[in-house]
Image (tube, helix red, strand yellow):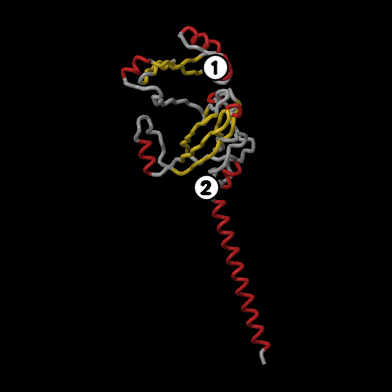
Amino acid sequence: MQQVKVEALNITVLKGSGQAVLDWCAQNGFAVDGDTRAHLLTYAQGSPIFMAVKYDTAEAQARHQATGDGAPLLITMRTPHPWVPLEVLALDGQTVNADLYFLTDEPLNTSALNAVAGQSAVGADISGAPGLHVAFQERMNPALYHDLSTDRNMSWVRPDGWLTYLTLDAPADTVTYDLSVTPDGVMRLTHFGTSPTASVESANAIPSWLPRLPLGAPQVILALGLALVIVGVCAWFIWRDARRTSKSRTLAP
């Protein structure tokens, strides 16, 4: 489908069945072990698109690149909703460490109910994925918008969008899932090998016509409720003292 070179990387985008991609790899000098073969065949059930990369050592030496140096890649996948393959990061006997950044129109959440109630997702884990943690979330600020939108191929960034940052730190044998975002902005796990274009509806979806409270509303409501309780208690003490004073005056000789 496409061939391009980025620094010392020769990249080929392929489309075909799992077996067809394996045959192409064998014909083009790619070594595919049993674990990689199994992953490829499973992912091929959900999507026929793959990317193969060869490292050009001569080009790397000419660029004075050392061991461990990498090349940033911008990969655009047109899917109806955000989708992140995570299971492919799980290597036997190792810990999966990954940082995930989402730029979205609305703040993401861990459940449909929390999204409607305005409950922040920060500090929460994704249900069913121990170690997949929402570390940070905020509306796009002017400085961040300028830095992102002026970068190459990043003009699509919206000034009123939201940034959500997740961390993944979990044993490889527990990362058996990929991550999708539902139309109502809920992050949820999908089965390894599910098509990126598959519809993902929240198991407890809230009707779209139901209005959403602003993010942080529960904390504001709790603070207001606490303030009302304090004011009520103070008013009760004042009323009680005033009543006692009134009674004392009435009983005085």
Q: Percent position (x, y) of residue 69?
A: 39, 24
Q: Residue furthest bottom?
A: 253
Q: Name which quarter of the figure residue 241 lies in.
A: bottom right
- Identify the residue shown where x is 53% and y is 17%: 48
Q: Residues within 10 Å of mark 2 (few under 14, many from 20)?
A: some
- Identify the residue shown where x is 39% and y is 18%: 9
Question: Can residue 110 be seen by looking at this rendering?
Answer: yes
- 104 sits left or right of 178 in the view: left
| On screen, residue 117 above or below 175 | below
Q: Nearer the viewer, residue 73 or 235?
A: 73
Looking at the rendered structure, the secondary structure element under dot 2 is loop
Q: Amino acid at mark 1?
A: Thr
Q: Nearer the viewer, residue 166 or 194?
A: 166
Q: Name which quarter of the figure residue 3 lies in.
A: top left
Q: Residues within 10 Å of mark 1 (few under 14, many from 20)?
A: few
Looking at the rendered structure, the secondary structure element under dot 1 is helix
| On screen, residue 207 above or below 6 | below
Q: How many marks?
A: 2
Q: Earlier in the sequence, mark 2 or mark 1?
A: 1
Q: Percent position (x, y) of residue 145?
A: 38, 40
| On screen, residue 212 above or below 63 | below
- Which residue position holds label 1? 36
Q: Amino acid at mark 2?
A: Leu
- Identify the residue shown where x is 49% and y is 15%: 15
- Which residue position holds label 2? 215
Quadrant in the picture for the C terminus? bottom right
| On screen, residue 222 above or below 231 | above
